[in-house]
């Protein structure tokens, strides 16, 4: 399906799109480009055979007025097709604004005096972290560009700042008016006197009994890249990087009997929110929309071999636009490699004693973004049994606040003297534009249950399965349920396998299925309405991409999934999109300090009657761990006697 129309913009296309915006004077004399990306065409037009041009979309800020614009540029003609003023929200933060916020606040006499009360006079060692302020109802945000800040003290330039929060001091700036509109001082509290650094020089001695572990592929990697298209064994798909969503998978197909069968048109993180659970005045308003307020793709790391990725690695760079609309490259933004994934399948014949084993291998496509104190790793794992596992890895440093000596605290965990780590959540919304053997799909909610004892179940052991058809958006109850082993299956009712079953793929939730705990009047509960459910099903709409709306920064309208689904649209036998909310409620442990071990969340997409039998029967046996690399040249196989 005209796959190149969906690919990320090239450096040349970024330059041409931004030049068209400047020619039209959109964004004034100093336009700020918060994001420039492919304006993906409507799939319905392509199916109807219409000619569709390649387009770019730009989120543009007028730095002088604070007005935000949503601009579409036709790249076939290099002309602006549309320019719409954003009604409620605002574009994500620009890189230069991070520095501007800090400079403005550090020159404000109220802020200087507040820090002096705490014995802090060298402001060069003070770090200010910006936060959106839309959760603070007392601030009128229309026509403004407001950011709030929290402060931390470094004892030396490379010091970990988060053990030393400057408690009680909150500053708010208006980046359009170029003024500090408020400095709140909620009272002095003692600062943790101890350093809490995580680097090797501060944590000697290091372990000496860690044996070397080498991962090699003497014959090279088993996948092939052609531009953004990757082919690995029976999988084929395209890899793109979006400045807001980060890693995007397009056109996932699986080869079966000589033909590629469609599984998913587009899969990505749509939005994520991190609401904090401290009710006090200086803390209650903190939350972060890491895609819509900051941009996960723009904050992607340059990954390093042996650190972020291990083995035989192929990297992809990300070409994105900087805030002036010029192309910039994040080197090694995407890591691609193969991993051993344990046993794929095994059977031991108890009569003959012969065992047949196949080891599983997965292809991993990953990226990592840094947003302030946290890091998020996104991993798309493709397996030989035609399943896809999506995994999020949470890393970094927990948010902190200072407390008095001996003070008990109901919303955090002590991690150092006078210091607690606050309770919070990380809620991820994944958008999965499914196309299971074509686009005419239906969705079922699956619940296992016991049957009443009676004529049909005289011994009480019967297990039943209830399949609830999601005919309209608000059918079903939309929460994970481990008691009923709940899953959701996307089926194509027009295609059957050999046994007469409609072909399908099911979404199997993982163990981390948190939903939003904040409730009205908390503004974040409305702004991140997507997080009220674990699952949403909508009909495909080209302009419904971001689950909290396109512009959650400063938006209080409740845009996104709750607004779209209010009409309870028909979704049966149509082009369906799954939106899966997952995440963790993080109650910090002492072991999470001063840097937390990785925490994981995710889900699995599994074929259900998509095939007639196990699609991984043709995976060859592995050679012995100490045998020759060429299995064909040796009978020293460890998995299949007689091969």
Image: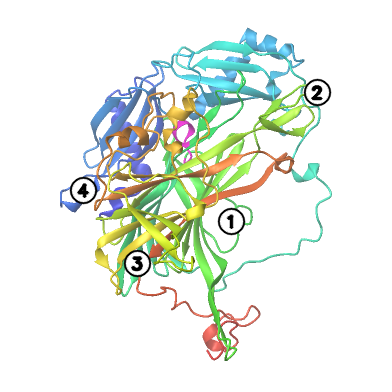
| Residue at mark 2 to residue at mark 1: CA–CA distance | 43 Å
Nearer the observer, 12 or 163: 163
Q: Secondary structure at mark 3?
A: loop
Cα–Cα span, label 4 and label 2: 63 Å
- Mark 4 or mark 2, whichever is nearer to me: 2
How many residues crowd mark 2 within 10 Å: few (<14), some (14–19), many (20+)? few
Q: Which mark is residue 405?
A: 2
The secondary element bearing badge 2 is classed as: loop
- Residue that numbered label 4 is attached to: 44
Where's residue 436, x and y in %? 31, 59
State the residue at coordinates (27%, 25%): 24
For disc 3, the neighbor class at 10 Å (few under 14, some 14 to 19, many from 20) is: many
Q: Residue at x 27, y 27 (%)?
A: 83
Camera-nearest residue between 545 and 18: 545
Q: Quadrant of residue 117?
A: top right
Pointer 3 with pointer 2, Cβ within 8 A: no
Residue 543 located left or right of residue 150: left
Q: Marks 3/1: CA distance?
A: 32 Å
308 lies above or below 134: below
């Amino acid at each position: 399906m005209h796959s190149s129309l969906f690919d990320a913009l090239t450096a040349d296309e970024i330059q041409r799109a931004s030049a068209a915006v400047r020619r039209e004077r959109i964004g004034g004399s100093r336009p700020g480009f918060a994001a420039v990306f492919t304006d993906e065409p409507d799939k319905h037009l392509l199916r109807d055979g219409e000619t569709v041009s390649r387009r770019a979309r730009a989120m543009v800020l007028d730095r002088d007025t604070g007005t935000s614009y949503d601009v579409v540029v036709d790249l076939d003609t290099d002309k602006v097709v549309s320019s719409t003023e954003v009604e409620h929200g605002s574009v994500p933060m620009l890189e230069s604004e991070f520095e501007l916020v800090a400079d403005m606040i550090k020159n404000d006499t109220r802020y200087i005096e507040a820090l002096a009360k705490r014995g802090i006079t060298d402001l060069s060692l003070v770090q200010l972290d910006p936060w959106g302020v839309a959760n603070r109802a007392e601030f009128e945000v229309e026509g403004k560009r407001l950011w709030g800040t929290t402060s931390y003290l470094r004892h030396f330039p490379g010091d970990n700042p988060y053990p030393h929060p400057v408690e009680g001091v909150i500053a708010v700036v208006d980046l359009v008016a170029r003024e500090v509109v408020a400095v709140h001082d909620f009272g002095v509290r003692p600062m943790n006197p101890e350093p809490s650094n995580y680097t090797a020089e501060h944590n000697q001695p290091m372990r000496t009994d860690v044996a070397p572990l080498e991962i090699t592929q003497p014959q090279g990697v088993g996948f092939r890249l052609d531009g953004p298209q990757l082919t690995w064994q029976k999988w084929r798909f395209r890899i793109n990087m979006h400045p807001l969503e980060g890693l995007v998978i397009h056109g996932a197909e699986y080869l079966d009997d000589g033909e590629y069968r469609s599984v998913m048109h587009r899969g990505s993180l749509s939005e994520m929110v991190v609401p904090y659970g401290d009710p006090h005045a200086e803390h209650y308003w903190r939350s972060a929309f890491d895609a819509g307020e900051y941009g996960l793709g723009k904050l992607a790391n340059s990954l390093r071999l042996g650190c972020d990725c291990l083995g035989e690695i192929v990297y992809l760079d990300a070409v994105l636009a900087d805030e002036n609309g010029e192309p910039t490259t994040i080197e090694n933004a995407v890591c691609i490699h193969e991993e051993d994934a344990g046993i794929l399948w095994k059977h031991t014949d108890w009569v003959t004693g012969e065992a047949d084993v196949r080891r599983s291998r997965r292809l991993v496509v990953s990226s990592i973004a840094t947003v302030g104190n946290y890091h998020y790793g996104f991993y798309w794992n493709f397996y030989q049994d035609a399943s896809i596992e999506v995994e999020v890895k949470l890393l970094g440093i927990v948010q902190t606040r200072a407390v008095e000596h001996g003070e008990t605290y109901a919303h955090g965990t002590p991690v150092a003297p006078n210091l607690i780590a606050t309770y919070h959540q990380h809620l991820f919304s994944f958008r999965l534009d499914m196309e299971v053997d074509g686009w005419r799909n239906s969705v079922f909610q699956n619940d296992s249950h016991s049957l009443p004892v009676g004529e049909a179940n005289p011994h009480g052991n019967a297990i039943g399965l209830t399949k609830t058809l999601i005919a309209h958006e608000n059918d079903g109850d939309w929460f994970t349920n481990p008691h009923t082993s709940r899953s959701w299956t996307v089926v194509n009712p027009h295609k059957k396998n050999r046994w007469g079953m409609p072909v399908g793929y099911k979404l199997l939730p993982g163990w981390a299925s948190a939903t939003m705990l904040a409730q009205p009047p908390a503004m974040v509960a409305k702004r991140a309405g997507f997080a009220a459910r674990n699952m949403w099903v909508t009909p495909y709409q080209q302009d419904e991409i971001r689950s909290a709306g396109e512009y959650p920064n400063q938006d209080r309208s409740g845009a996104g999934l709750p607004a779209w689904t209010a009409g309870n649209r028909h979704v049966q036998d149509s082009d369906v999109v799954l939106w899966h909310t997952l995440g963790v409620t993080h109650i910090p442990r002492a072991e999470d300090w001063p840097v937390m071990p990785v925490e994981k969340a995710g889900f699995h997409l599994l074929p259900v009657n998509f095939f007639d039998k196990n699609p991984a029967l043709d995976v060859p046996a592995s050679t012995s761990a100490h045998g020759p690399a060429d299995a064909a040249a040796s009978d020293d196989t460890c998995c299949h006697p007689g091969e």
